[in-house]
Every structure is written in structure tokens, then in C-alpha cells.
Amino acid sequence: MLTVIGVAISYLLGSISFSILIAKWFKGIDIRSYGSGNAGATNTLRVLGKGPGAAVFLLDIVKGIAAVVLGYLLSDGQWTAVLCGLAAIVGHNWPIWFGFKGGKGIATTVGVMCSLALLPTLIAGLIAVAAIAATRYVSLGSLLFALATPVLILVWQKPYAFFWASLLLCIFAFVRHRSNIVKLLQGNENKLGARRR
């Protein structure tokens, strides 16, 4: 019963879209009507600038961390923490408070996976940052992060609960980025710092 409660709370927590809220508070706009239409840190960065973009990124990470911590507080089992983390990401992607139209979940995934398997997640994050720095494609870095995390969790022999969570999140990321993948393959994906096409 505590697990069900924790998952429900985590979903509601994940459904708090800081991108939508900050855009509404600072500019009086719905971020989903601008830029890529995505309610996430990258689109906030493009539309509102570095400060709001960084704030959204950090707050979305905190959502993921809080959900996993809640799971650990409610149960000493790993699966409760995993399920709460997954619920927060589902909430971010499909937020009940905002018509089930949210972001792509990468920042919240970072928070969840850092809480579950810190070192593999940090290394995957460094790979992502290096890819973004080299190409200026945030979507490519996000996908590499999602792909590298389950591989590194296996290398570090972390619990299988964490591996299956990271693998599911990898699938989530690729599904949510399918339009970006098409653009990357076609060579017309938007680069970080470039004016949106």
C-alpha cells in the first residue's frame, strides 16, 4: 500500500512542470506554444534564456531525486524507489496538471538515475556533455546519456532493478525524441545557440 501511495505522490510531483510555470510567471506565456513546443529545459533555454533554462533543468533534476528519496523512505526495497522514480518521469512527460502534455524527461531522468546509481550516471552525463559540446546537438547528448546509462550500470554491476529502470528510461527517451532522431539523420536538427528553423 505504501508503494502505491509513493508512486501516486511521485507522479503528481513529476507533473509539476517548472518549464510551464516559470514561462507563465516570467513572461505570461505557455512555453508549449513557442520554440519546439516542448515543456523542458532546452526549450526554456531557447525561448527565455540561460537563467530560466538552468532553473528548469535543476528543478526537474530535484523532482527525480525527491521521488527516489520518497521511495526509499517508504520502503527498504529497491523496487519502490525505482517505481517512484519512474512515476516522476511519467508525470513530467504526461503531467496531469497540464493536459498531459509535458517534456521529454531527460533532466528528471538524470535526477532519478543519480539517486539510484551515481557513478554510472555521472559518467553517462559526461559523455552527453562532451557530445553536446562537440556537436551542439542537445538531443544527441540526451540520447547518448540514455543509452550509456544502462550499459554503465551493467559494467558497474549495480542491482538489476536499476538496470531495468535505466533500460526502460532509455526506451522512453528514444520514443520521446523520435522526431529529433529523424532530424538528426536528415541533418536539420536545431543546434544549441542557433536560431530555431
Image (cartoon, grey):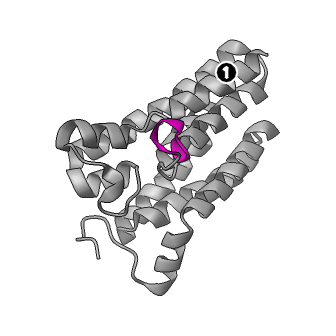
Q: Is residue 168 left or right of residue 124?
A: right
Which residue sits at x=31%, y=65%? 192
Q: Is residue 159 visible?
A: no
Q: Is residue 78 left or right of residue 129?
A: right
Image quarter hosting the C terminus: bottom left
Q: Position of residue 64 (x, y in %)?
A: 54, 33
Q: Is residue 162 visible?
A: yes
- Residue at label 1? 6
Q: Main secondary structure of the magenta part?
A: helix
Q: Count neighbours of disc 1 (C-alpha within 10 A) and say few if under 14, some if 14 to 19, many if 20 or more.
A: many
Q: Position of residue 190 (x, y in %)?
A: 35, 72
Task: Work out whether residue 128 or residue 123 is closer to the camera in this orientation and state it.
Answer: 128
Residue found 54% across the figure and 48% down from its top: 123
Question: What's the residue type where badge 1 is placed?
Answer: Gly
Residue numbers of the magenta segment = 92-99
- Is residue 67 rendered magenta in the image? no
Q: Residue at x 78, y 37 (%)?
A: 161
Q: Nearer the viewer, residue 123 or 54?
A: 54
For image coordinates 32% across by 37% down, the residue present is 21
x then y, percent, for residue 49: 20, 51
Image: 58 above or below 32: above
Q: Is 76 on the left or on the right of 49, as rendered?
A: right
Residue 84 screen position, x and y as percent: 66, 29
Asked if the stretch drawn in magenta spans residue 94, the answer is yes
Position of the N terminus by quadrant: top right
In the displayed structure, would residue 175 be above or below residue 96?
below
